[in-house]
Amino acid sequence: MITPRARTHSPVSMEPLEPRLVLAVIDGLPTISDLETPTNPVVVLETDLGDIYIELFPQDAPGTVDNFIEYVNRGLYGESLFHRSQPGFVLQGGGFAYTPDLGLQGIFAEDLGPIVNEFGRSNLARTIAMAKSSDPDSATSQFFFNLVNNPGLDNPGNSGGFTVFGRVITNASWTVVQNIVALDIEDLRNDDALEDQLVDRSGNLLFRTGGGFLTTVDTGMPAFGNTAFGSNGFSSGGFPVNPSFDGTFADGDEVEILNAQLVKPEGDFGYFDELVAIPEGFRSPKTYETLSLENSNDFEVVAQVVVRYERGVREEVIFSGVVNANESLQVVLHDPLTPADSLVRPITPYAIEVYTAAEAPAPPPVTADPDDARPVAASFTHLDFGDTLGDSGSYQTGLLERSTTWDFPSIPIGNTDLPYLVWQNIGDEDTTVTVRFFGSSFGSFTRTFDLEAYRRGGLEIWDNVATFLENQPAGTQVSARVTATTPIVVGLSAYRPVNGGQNDPEAEGVLGQPGAAIEGAAAGVSIPATASSFVTALNATNSVAVITLVAFRSNGTFLSVTPPQFIMTANSRASVDLANVFPTIPTGEVFTLRFNSTTPVALEASVRGGITGNRTRRAFMFDARASSIVHFADVRLVPGSPNFSDRISVFNPFANSGLDVVLDFRFSDGTVISSSTISLLALGRTDVSAASVAAVLAKANAGVEFQQFSVTVRGAILGTPAPLVASLSRIDSGSGNDLIREIASAGMLDSDITDLDDPIFDPGSGS
């Protein structure tokens, strides 16, 4: 377990919030009753022929299991291949990977070294064991499946016996193994594509020690040659190939392990059955990055944080451990003051996936409804306090569905802006990403990109699209629809270096709207006195869209303006200034906006502009969905500071029913402080600052560690959970009064998600 470190230096001026998206995580998991021991860990090898679920036996081979899981967690088995198939004997992998640019690569972790032999279990059919040389303690990364009972491998005289450390669990998984073995087998020892000197997964040349082990130290002995694995690392005639093989090996001919992942931790009765995906991360020498995690359950859960990189070895597990009941904790990913302790790779874009294993409060056979266990909420904060920029700003979050379409109504592309679109492939299939840009003056155009399974990718918009997007005047914007052939998660980051990037960097960001909607709401909107507040709409359909905005105020009144604010032609974008739409709402007043449209659209609220030295910039999508529980994993409070405050805005979407709202504040020591019940009238709203709750303010005053916490917003009607819409705004003036930034975030929705166009919200339909 990695122990999160407390932040020791002073807060800086910009503390943005990153996107979080809840997803149903893994399909086809074995049942607990399928396991030999219900607390054993489980790993899945996702191959291009199907998934192989493996139960590991830590009670019989603890060191071997730890070694195998470490290779899994470092991402070294992902995108590897099976290099030996011997029907009636074994199927072997864990030794090599192949890419056209690096050729054949050795799966190699020199610091793990050879492991001590732990032979004990018999090599029966369906078990998995470690491969090794004649030295009993020579196993490293290579493993094999016993296709039949192999008593000869149990002979202590045969290298001390081969250590069995797990078994294939389900019949479906065993069928996958059999299907791989049924493929053609080729002798590739002299194939040109595999004859270059062996390198590791990063492209470093590999050599062999006197004991025959791999090393990056130049020993004068190449990794290939007369080795125990054959003249070039493979057994004669043992390489399984896909039907695409035409006599000469090429990329795609191998049987690939697309992904290897721990799906059930040791000692737990539950699988990692929820995922929170964050598509953006980047470590530079001057960034400070943290991941905030919130467990809102009354029992502990296990969290596993996987980072997926854009380049190089695709993934690694950077955090795995228990999050205590009602705990809000912070994992420091990178601190420029202590770069040696960084958990993420430098100068490589990455995405974050947070997995939750939440067992029922009682172990089997007594079980509870899985919905009783809520996923760990997560928020990523990226601070850049040097001469570069802050990271992304505001995000809509929290869906229990996978989407292939993401809309972005407002992308700044002026000559001072640096916008990025970033995406994460959350599945085991390669996908094609298509970005369609919409402009007020040029219509639309598209760009297409390939994205490998589980990879993070992205687009530097100013540098990689049509030349007519370059050198546009400040303030120029476009819209975009991002689609993919498989489900992905997509976010936007936009940066603006001010004064050459030295003093006043600005940044904003938003997770796209996953699919258009005909209704939506933004819980906390305001019209600043020194900037402009806009609502931008994207109609990416072939139909006309008529969109009406309605403003709901805290005093119980609402404003609906006629005619509609948007009458949009097909495949177009448009924007309105809220100060012109609602001139009677005073500047600085916080209100809720709701839209209705005749055709599905995406809407975004943004604040931009301002006078020199008093600059504010934010953006966030309208929520198209509501939930009875909304999580904010990263909330801050700096007692006594007039320059910093967090505000949570809550809206009751019911047109004919009141709603009771309670806010739960969770701290790193497990303390939970609940607000008094707030009763909202139908279509009512409120704003709550952390400082307004006396017990929270007192807790924050107790020390620095209690100035960062999480908040869960709960809605109910007559004691029954009921949906609400909520957002978080952070007012951050830094160390002085000359700079104001408002950063907003929608919360992470929980499992009971309801579309805002649901009839339950309409007048006369009941609650």
Image (cartoon, grey):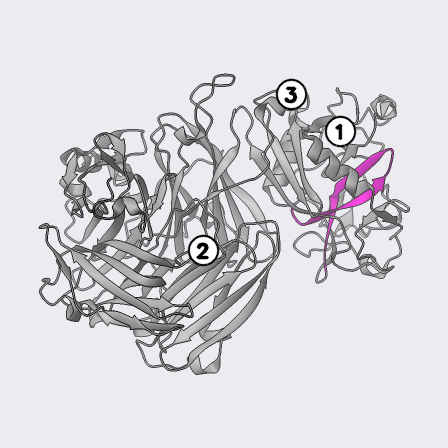
The boundaries of the magenta stretch are: 78-99
From the image, tell me which residue sits under label 2. Answer: 280
What is the secondary structure assignment of the residue under circle 2?
loop
Report the residue at 17% width, 38% height from top: 697
Choose between 339 and 398: the one closer to the eye.
398
Q: Amino acid at mark 1?
A: Arg
Please identify the quarter of the rendering in which residue 99 is found: bottom right
Q: As shown in the figure, which amino acid type bears the numbered disc 2? A: Glu
Disc 3 vs disc 2: Cβ atoms closer than 8 Å?
no
Name the residue type under label 3. Answer: Glu
Does residue 231 sit above or below 44 in this rendering?
below
Separation of residues labelled 3 and 2 (CA atoms): 39 Å
Question: Is 304 a magenta residue?
Answer: no
Residue lying at 69% horizontally and 34% vertically, measured from the top left: 172
SS label for mark 3:
loop
Q: Residues within 10 Å of mark 1 (few under 14, many from 20)?
A: many
Spot the residue most to the top.
365
Q: Which mark is residue 126?
A: 1
Sequence-wise, the earlier of marks 3 and 2 is 3
| Residue with the mark numbered 3 | 36
Point out the tag, 1 or 3, that comes first from the N-terminus. Answer: 3
Which numbered disc flags the more N-terminal residue, 1 or 2? 1
